[in-house]
Image (cartoon, coloured by chain):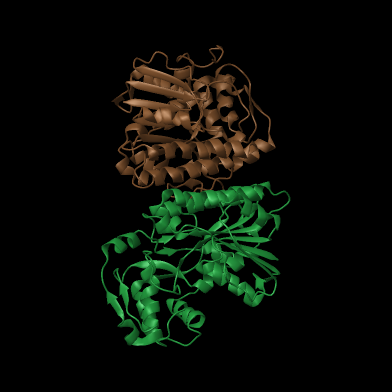
Chain colours: A brown, B green
Amino acid sequence: MHVAIIGAAGMIGRKLAERIADTGKMGGASVDALTLIDVHAPNVAEHFAGTRTALAADLSNAGTIAGLIAQKPDVIVHLAAIVSSEAEADLEKGYRVNLDGTRALFEALRHAEGYTPRLIYASSLAVFGAPFPTRIPDDFQLTPQSSYGTQKAMGELLLDDYSRRGFLDGVGIRFPTICIRPGKPNKAASSFYSSILREPLNGQQAVLPVSEDVRHWFASPRAAVGFIEHGATLNSALLGARRSMTMPGVSATVADQIEALRVVAGDKAVALIRREHDPAIASIVESWPRDFDTARANQMGFRAETSFREIIEVYLEDEMDGQGPNAMRPVA
Amino acid sequence: MHVAIIGAAGMIGRKLAERIADTGKMGGASVDALTLIDVHAPNVAEHFAGTRTALAADLSNAGTIAGLIAQKPDVIVHLAAIVSSEAEADLEKGYRVNLDGTRALFEALRHAEGYTPRLIYASSLAVFGAPFPTRIPDDFQLTPQSSYGTQKAMGELLLDDYSRRGFLDGVGIRFPTICIRPGKPNKAASSFYSSILREPLNGQQAVLPVSEDVRHWFASPRAAVGFIEHGATLNSALLGARRSMTMPGVSATVADQIEALRVVAGDKAVALIRREHDPAIASIVESWPRDFDTARANQMGFRAETSFREIIEVYLEDEMDGQGPNAMRPVA
């Protein structure tokens, strides 16, 4: 199987490529070719045993897409996107990359005769905006309240229409908020969700800008890679006309996160969390979804962690070589 | 108030323009200027007392849009669209007109400094596709199963995002199936819904291609015009972030339609309906929505007929000069 990853330099793309290189497989099928595409040629999965191609390219470049499609990868994982905050700050760039880039890819597939690859489309919880029920069902309307969420929801609609017409074989994955993200805090409003665990696990202070009763929906980076792997070989006939699904995850309050941290790393780690209310972040986070009934994805066999403790343990295993908390080594 | 109607030569656009010309008003406000736009210059509402401009133009022509926006109409009614069957047969044309044309209009409004018109966006029941509950609630997901429905749903998302950002003040109207349409039967799968009433009311035979227990959602052309009028001056602050709504209507089976025809026009009219099963039409119609709970639109003050008898009576009044059934005059 030939797998192409567009947006392979991002956190999920990198982890997916590394995992394919490690196992030589994806969703149970052998992978003999891997094409990695990003704005800068992705410098990952260099130990992959099959044919590995790294390309620096932009989705809005028609030539790039044509070159990719000429190779007819069996699975295309489309992770490339302008992130939420940038898509909000730069409307034109967000629509150009997130909507037009996606459409250009789908259009190129439409024009490729006799070629209908599995297309994994990365969507987001940002397609949901308040008001919504505490537990959002699979058939709830998409009500984005950001340009990023709007672009992702429009991509989901295109994915359904182009799948229905047989131009591609789409599987849309609405990722939970990924936690614990490796690396450093960033300017995303969601950054603290990883930071209040990651920093204390590494013996460092972290700032909590919202109250502890705020609830949200999470899965680990490992689960996120697993969703893509599972989607790559899923029998899409089971999906019918609706190709996108909210992925399973853990609904947890900040208090739940902190309690899990206490169980894994003790009171000393918890004491490293400093409360510093930030009304701007609190107000953004307030409108985010809290909980989902993901019956459909569960039934299709997608799996995530079932407790926050598990999510923390995945971080210890995958990012700290299983060394346990407070190992005081710097995070890569 | 200056009102611009894009797609003014269509059935609803024409009726809306005529009504504004008759009353000099829209949604309670005085109208002193009317700009009518369609692919061919619309030849309607010539008795309008204010300033009337008719333009032959295409939404994909940037110059046209710029010219329209320079006049800063207070209300823009965007009815222009490639219809369902054509958008399915010609993918490129459907996306170009229904999606790109809408986006070009919204983008032009984004670039117009200090100008935020009310934008009435015509959407459709085609944004819904089976499976769905028998009675679809306001918060049910949009699951189009046609390219037309996909394009309309994408337009709804854009309408919300561009309204949220303050580039326009959108109100999206999902029209029920309009019944009784004046004129002749056409190739639309929905054509029989009007035909089985209109033809017998005019003393002519009609063909019923589906079984009598098929249920669907209807409103009259007069109600459709009323939705737009009401939307033109609605306090959009009441809508919040979700600008599009399913409009009220009458949920009726074909048997209900026929019974209403019998009450209004007698057994002789009903006898003019010839059953001739058409599996292709039956299968298309089978996937269409049957009933809606339109609590939101009701609360916002949108009104439709409440029985099929009323829908037939509107036809007699508006299309047959109130002459009653079997007047045996040709329909204009």
Front one among A326 and B93:
B93
Total count of labels = 0
Quadrant (top left, top right, bottom left, bottom right) of the N terminus of chain B: bottom right
Front one among B125 and A271:
B125
Q: Quadrant of residue B292?
A: bottom left
Residue A261 x %, y %: 53, 25
Up the image or down, B290 lies above or below A6; here it is below
Residue B46 x %, y %: 62, 74
Residue A331 x %, y %: 55, 15
* Lateral position of residue B318 relative to residue A110, left or right: right
The answer to whether residue B304 of the structure is visible from this angle is no
Up the image or down, A121 lies above or below B117; here it is above
Up the image or down, A162 lies above or below A6; here it is below
Up the image or down, A145 lies above or below B295; here it is above
- Which residue is drawn at the image coordinates 33% and 75% (left, top)? B255
- Which residue is drawn at the image coordinates 59% and 36% (left, top)? A93
Q: Quadrant of residue A306?
A: top left
